Image: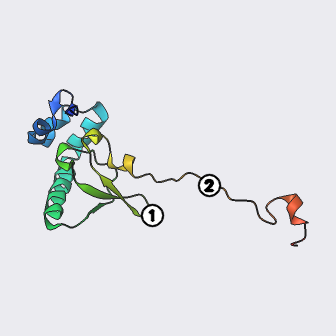
Amino acid sequence: MPKEFSYRGKSLEELKSLDTREFAKYLGADSRRSVLRHFEVIEKFVKKCRKRAEQGKPIRTHLRDLVILPNMVDYTIFIHNGKEFVQIKMMPEMLGHRLGEFAQTRRKVEHGAPGIGATKSSASMSVK
């Protein structure tokens, strides 16, 4: 039997029934302040998510600084990482985090083999 998810002692159903401002009380200080200051933007985005999910269209956004709320759980959101949109499925464990945390903007550097002219010694070597 899998363990039921809870966030600060509340189940996901209880959190979904809360208003955005009421849920902000359960967040940490920086996330709470962000939610309360950008309340209108967050409400507009949640409404957009609901509408586009009903239509079966993808939810795409550049808003990497939005805090993930219980109303966003189970949606698939495409978050822009500066080059492309990365598909992220919202899980209950992501509550309180920012969207940008899950769409990395930098990749691990993978170096290939050095070519001719890559070093001073190889510059004087013949191509053969």
Q: Which mark is residue 110?
A: 2
Inspect the image, locate mark 1, and give the three-letter code of the amino acid beneath it. Answer: Lys
For badge 2, the amino acid type reads Glu
Q: CA distance from mark 2 to mark 1?
A: 18 Å
Q: Residue at coordinates 51% horizontally, 53% vertically from top-left?
A: 106
Q: Quadrant of residue 121?
A: bottom right
User: What secondary structure is marked by label 2?
Assistant: loop
Image position, residue 112 (x, y; %): 68, 59
Percent coordinates x, y for residue 8 in the rendering: 21, 28
Q: Is residue 82 left or right of residue 66?
A: right
**Placement of the C terminus among the 4 image quadrants:** bottom right
Q: Position of residue 52 (x, y in %)?
A: 18, 64
Nearer the observer, 113 or 81 = 113
Q: Say above or below: 97 vs 9.
A: below
Which residue in the protein does label 1 denote?
83
Q: Residue at x 27, y 49 (%)?
A: 90
